[in-house]
Every structure is written in structure tokens, then in C-alpha cells.
Amino acid sequence: MKVAVFGCGYVGLVTGACLSALGHQVECVDVDPRKVETINRGETPIFEPGLEAMLKENLAAGRFRATLDAQGALEGARLSMIAVGTPDRDGHIDLSFVEGVARTIGAHLRTAPDDHTVVVKSTVVPGTTLGLVARTLEAASGRVAGEDFGVAMNPEFLREGFAVQDFMEPDRIVLGHLGVQAGQALEALYAGFACPKLHVNPTEAEFIKYASNALLATCISFANELYTLCEATPGADGRKVLEILHMDRRLTPVHQGEAVRPGLLSYLFGGVGYGGSCLPKDLNAITAMARERGLPAPLLDQVVAVNRRRPAAIVDRLARELGGLQGRTVALLGLAFKPGTDDWRHSPSQPLVDALLAQGATVRAWDPLVDAGAVAAWGGRVALHRTSAVLAGAHAAVLATAWPELTAWPWADLVGTMATPVVLDGRNALEHVAWPGSVRYVPVGRGPALA
Ligand code: NAD
């Protein structure tokens, strides 16, 4: 099947490459000429394990290419997928990229055969596919959605850093469509997958994606709130509390005496807050949608509020340890929103740095993957390091991302290079280290020792 995918970002490029690996003929459209050139050279503009090899193989086989030419990509395609960004604009979802692509596809539909199906893969607030997208397609094509062409919503659940694996080994595929034709096109697209394929309507499909991200964010804020309470309670260790909570078989299913994979519970640990390109924007989008429709969503409002407070609380904790941050040098370890990705969009490292600078600290950042653009926003006030020399002369280190590299550092030697050996472990990733007696090691979620 020929497929035109709009957007060569994490979702569009991974979707396009994986579909071509399954034997489909894929053209991935983007508006960024540099991205298109890079991809057609067999390189990836993003870091995702396995993606580059897959791209090279399918480019060589002639099953995949990137292009700036939208109408050329649509020519002969049975299916088009909208996988462009839906960013946050002042706490609301910005659907202008989705709308723009719908207009482009609609122009093609004026003359396309009747079996074309338009699939929304971007995360969009419930009602968007049958509302804005279908209306735009109809206005641009002069034809009727659901009759002259198919419309569908097929949410994506991939995790950055595991994107290829998650796409190729999904737990389930959600096919949100109205009418038989779009459902058949999606079944044909995913014929190579054995997992359950759930046929729902587009609005339910949109809700499933938001419900998924809202639950993950709720787990994280729940854990962070518990940690905040434990941190103020002598003798309490929030980490231990959650680990033992996890052993309840209602939360971690047990099969033949063995705990089944941790699943959701890997999200039920505290830290410096959730971040990334999805959870913050999706929680903002769904709570803004609730407000606009006059619907109360007090739980999700508080999930967002707890998350916003967490980085500042971490920095306040550090300030108490150091007796103030004015004139102190702090090494912030990890800018990416989680290990295994170069994505630092909406990472909690950003409010952490902001709060450190606001309290007068000098900040150096360390990260193995993010590019220099990550620190450019602070206008030269934050230097980016790639080695453990970031610790030399620092008054404190704050671990913000649980990069495995950090657990392998020779900490016992490195703390000797610091001006004052204070380590605030925002992910409790360094608990195994045998810290020299001189070091003040501060994990999150743990209250003061019992008197
Ligand atoms: P991204 O920002 O990485 O990529 C979007 C791409 O779309 C960019 O390359 C941009 O140049 C391109 N683009 C913009 N306008 C275009 C147009 N008119 N025609 C063609 N291309 C255009 O975004 P992403 O992370 O891939 O996310 C895409 C969507 O998928 C979002 O709605 C996001 O919420 C959702 N999603 C993301 C993830 C994730 O982990 N990143 C996971 C699931 C769902």
C-alpha cells in the first residue's frame, strides 16, 4: 500500500520507517528541507535506537523516501497520515499544523479516487478528527468525509528512546474510524501485526490517548506528593513505601510466583517531576479543553499543579543544604527529560535551571546526548559539559536525569574534585554508591533521620 506520512519528527519518521519495513511504500513529507535531505542521506535527525539502520535499508530498497513535495507524495496513496506537532500554546493545544496538513490533503482529495483514507496520528483533543480535521478536508476538497473519503484517528503510544521497538511490538493498536472503508484501510495497513486491534470511533481513540497520558502523569504526581510528605517526616523513606506498595498483586500482577513486568508501576516513583514533549502538553491540553467546555477536571488540574511545584521544591531543598545558593556553582546532571533520548523539550531540567539561576547559583549542565541548543535558551549563562569534569569545583551536583552513564562514574574519586561534596539525587539513581563519609548525599523522598 502506498502511504503518505506528514511530519518527519519522532512519530512521523518512526511510523514511516517501520511501515516501509513492513513492506508498504512510504513517502514522508516535511516542510524542513534540512530534515528531508538528512533523512534521504540515510541519517536520522533524531536519536532513536535502530532507526538509522531501518532507514538505510528501506531507502536502499526503494520503499521509503522523505520529500518536501506533498502533492507528489499523495499521488497514488491509499492512505495519508497526519503526524505533525500539536504543541502547547499558552496552555492550549495548537492545532494549526494539523489544520494546515488537512488543507493540503483536502486539495488532493478534489481529484483523488474514492478509496483514500486520512488518518490522524498526532495527539489531538477529543472531537478534533470529526470536527476540525473532517471540516477542513471537506472544505478543501468539496467532498464528504465518510462517504467520498475515509477519516480515522489512530493514536500513537511509542516512547522516545524505544520508539522503533514500541512501534513494531505494540500491546494493542487503536483504530478509531467511522464507516467500513477507513476501518478496512487501517486493517490492511497493520495486517502484519498480531496484537489486538481495537475498532472504536475517532473520538474514543482521541480519548484513549489522553486517558493514557493523564494516568501516567497522575502516577508521577501522586508519587511526588507522597515524596514531598515523606521528605518533611522524620524516619520516612518514600522510595521504600512505594516499593512495598508495588508488591500488592492488584498493582503488580503475579504469574507463577514471578512479578509480571512492572508496567504502569515504573511510573509510580517520585523524582523531579514529569516532562518531555508529551505529558506536560497533553495534560495542559486536556485540562484546557475541560475548562473551555465548562467541565470540572480538578484531579488533573492538581496533577499539573503538583508537577509545576516539584522542581522549585527540589531547588529549595538544595538551598537549605548549602545555606543559600548565591554565588554557588551547581552541576546539573542530565538535561534530557529521560535517559536514552536527546529530547529536552519541556524537560524538568529547564525549571530546575531557572530556579537555580533565580536563586543566584552559577549552573553547569552535563548531558551525553542533547545538543548545544538545549542550553542556548539561557543566553550563555549555562555551559554544556560532556564529561565528569563538570563536577570540578562545584558546590553541589543535582541529578535530574537517570542516565546509566552517571551510575558508572567513579563517584568516590570525583567528589574529591568538588568544592563541597553535596549530591542531590533527584532520581534516586545513585543509592548504590558507597559515599565517602565527607559527602552529603540527599536522595529524594526521604525525611530526616529519626532522632
Ligand atoms: P515533532 O515536533 O518531532 O515533529 C513534527 C514534524 O512535523 C516536524 O519535523 C515538522 O517540521 C513537521 N511539520 C510541521 N508542519 C508540517 C507540514 N505542514 N507538513 C509536513 N510536515 C510538517 O513532533 P512529534 O514528537 O513527532 O509529535 C507529533 C505528534 O505525535 C504530536 O501530536 C505528539 O503529541 C504526538 N506523539 C508524540 C510522541 C513522542 O514521543 N514524541 C508519542 C506519541 C504521540
Image: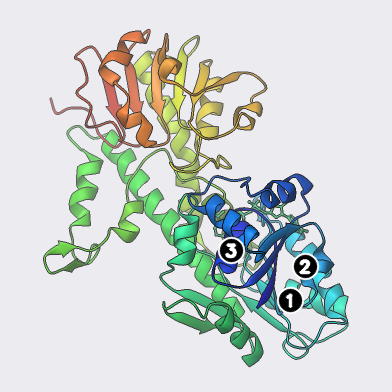
Can residue 214 be seen at all in this image of the molecule?
no
The kind of residue tagged 3 is Thr
* C-alpha span from label 3 to label 2: 15 Å
Q: Which of pointers 3 and 2 lies earlier in the amino acid sequence?
A: 3
The one of 272 and 102 positioned closer to us in this rendering: 102
The kind of residue tagged 1 is Ala
Classify mark 2: residues with Cα within 10 Å, few (<14), some (14-19) or many (20+).
Answer: many
Can residue 234 be seen at all in this image of the molecule?
yes
Is residue 281 positioned above or below 73 on the image?
above
**Which residue is rendered at x = 64% and y = 53% of the image?**
9
Q: Are marks 1 and 3 in contact (CB under 8 Å)?
A: no
- Secondary structure beneath disc 1? loop
**Which residue is rendered at x = 84% and y = 75% of the image?**
108
Q: Which of pointers 1 and 3 lies earlier in the amino acid sequence?
A: 3
**Which residue is rendered at x = 58% and y = 63% of the image?**
15
Is residue 445 positioned above or below 151 on the image?
above
Q: Which quadrant of the figure contains the C terminus?
A: top left
The one of 175 and 111 positioned closer to us in this rendering: 111
Percent x, y for residue 185?
62, 84
Q: Is mark 2 within 8 Å of ligand 1?
A: no
The one of 1 and 92 positioned closer to us in this rendering: 1
- Secondary structure beneath disc 3? helix
Percent x, y for residue 235?
17, 34
Mark 2 = which residue? Answer: 73
Mark 3 = which residue? Answer: 15
* C-alpha span from label 1 to label 3: 16 Å
Q: Quadrant of ligand 1?
A: bottom right
Q: Quadrant of residue 204?
A: bottom right
Percent x, y for residue 141?
86, 79
Mark 1 = which residue? Answer: 77
Residue 251 lies left or right of residue 216; in this view the side is left
